[in-house]
Amino acid sequence: MVKYISKRLLLLVFTLFLVVTATFFLMQVMPGTPFNNPKLTPDMLAQLNKAYGLDLPVWQQYLHYLANAFTGDFGTSFQYQNQSVGMLIGQRLPVSAQLGAQALVVGVIAGLFMGAASARNKNNKIDGTLGIISTLGISVPSFILGIILVYLFGFKWALFPVSGWGDSFSETILPTLALAVSPAAVTTRFVRSEMIEVLSSDYVQLAKAKGLSDKEIVNKHAYRNSMIPVLTLIGPMAANLLTGSVLIENIFSIPGIGQQFVTSIPSKDFPVIMGTTIVYAMMLMVMILITDILTAVVDPRVRLR
Amino acid sequence: MSEVLKVENLHVDFNTYAGKVKAIRDVSFSLEKGETLAIVGESGSGKSVTTKTLMGLNAKNAEISEGSQLLFKGQNLLDLKESEWQKIRGNEIAMIFQDPMTSLDPTMKIGMQIAEPLMKHQKLSKEAALKRALALMEGVGIPAAAEHIDDYPHQWSGGMRQRAVIAIALAADPEILIADEPTTALDVTIQAQILKLMKDIQQQTDNAIIFITHDLGVVAGMADRVAVMYAGKIVEYGTVDEIFFNPQHPYTWGLLNSMPTTDTQSGGLQAIPGTPPDLLEPPKGDAFAARNQYALAIDRQEEPPFFKVSETHYAATWLLDERAPKVTPPIPIQNRWAHWAQLKGNEA
């Protein structure tokens, strides 16, 4: 196990290196420059380029970046003056990660319950209703749901604050719900189809023949077996949620990293693009590693080598 | 001998989009303590539906007609609520499933799977149940059971897994053990081991076994009595010797002729022509008439009642009616009859 994890971590570093390299050179292909204020004179531009090292040949820039990144220096944002990328991400990532983690927990737990309820009531009214709910949850964009939630719970019934972050837990409730709907819906559909298959398996028949009740069968046999494929779904889902959502963060005025992700690209804020890409890639790989480990824990047939 | 189970006038229909499939059409039999009753017949004859009905495990679209009775310890199982069924299943009536490769939960330790019915029915603690599970594993011949109690199913071979499935069925010491083709999925040498194991266990526990199979070779070695099923009905039943050496129903003849024996000469195996009838609309008269070269005119008109051959042997064929013409069965059956006459002669 330890050997397996260290092997995977090594692989992770190597993959990260590839991601950094690919992103770095792709950025250079983008037309335009980070400094496109029409008031800048050519002299001032040259000065700026020199200050940020953009006058050097690309391969030198690349080596510099690598060397600095290795020592933990990811550069300074072009867009937000004097803010180091490390600081920017360090301040904003925890906010997005908290929101994402809350949404992940709520979404996956709701999905597990609704999926199992759907499967156990296959083709009757409960299944039909949950089917409609999960289809809506997948097809309605989260920002529309966010706006509806704000209107109902924030404005009409005034139960929760409609925006802000960091003052109280109640501020996090509406964005968490808005963000959790889609993962809940996806998980519901996945768990439903898995569990329907498991419930018709021979070993569930045998469990029935042992005299177990339906509830015992679902809890002791069906959940565990349905979870195996569901885990593969949750890994990338977690990476996505933990790295922030532009729309939700905008609607609820949350100082998360999601916005950085997007605005850094059109403004060609190279250091921030690199930094957020690294964060995202790392998050994804770590989550996939965790799901692989969890899969081995749940399914004894999987051996990690 | 005491009777543990009496099935009377069992009718099971399945409601499908195409209509009502009459899967079990008036089946009656009884089961004595310590005996093995084999139910034989080809696929679709209703063997498995019969056993599922005995376990209360039929699909939701099954409909059991009123007047059907499953008497177990004086109570009609068909009146039970689901929660009462759960006290019977795995406790008083247990089942051995067909395919050991898919019958065990792949994510649960085998010892735990054997302990589960004990915790449920005998309210044993986990430790006590696992201790008993270990004894059961030893009882079904799993070598070094203590080392393997925490194994998962994928670590075991098919034969070993079937032993575990048997241990699960035996866990709560059931009165009736239903074995639904328990050796079909195993290779022949393992089959023999598993059959011997079941025989040995029966001698120790004196439980009754209902053995479902389409393999007559297995029946000969296992069963005390045999019921032959066709198209949702029992067409002939008797002791194992009566069925093998004095068969009366043309369908039983067909089954026996399609089974190889040591005397079978090359080209001697006879298949039964045709296919079983559609049970959406069972044919009028004898369901086997269309495939039966010995069918009489009345077979297509009226269903034959059971004719008594001996105290223990009955067959539902018009050939046994005193007005029926005497027919000559196929030569292998004549040989069997000759053997039977010899047996009877020796007894006398």
Image: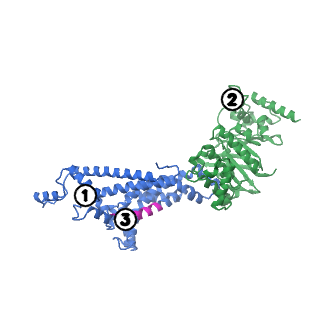
Circle 2 chain: B
Residue B56 as seen in the image, left or right of residue A165:
right
Residue A100 colored magenta? yes
**Chain rendered blue:** A
Q: Quadrant of residue A86?
A: bottom left
Of the two numbered discs 1 and 3 on the same chain, state the one appearing first in sequence.
3
Residue type indicated by callout 2: Leu
Q: Is mark 2 on a helix, strand or loop?
A: loop
Residue at numbered disc 2: B269
Residue at numbered disc 3: A146
Disc 2 residue crowd, few under 14, some 14–19, many 20+, Cα 10 Å: some
Residue type indicated by callout 1: Pro
Boundaries of the magenta span: A93-109
Residue at numbered disc 1: A271
Q: Which x, y percent locates residue B155?
A: 57, 47
Residue A84 colored magenta? no
At x 19% / y 58%, what residue is drawn? Answer: A52
Q: What element carries label 3?
A: helix
Q: Please check whether the numbered discs 1 and 3 fall on a single chain.
A: yes
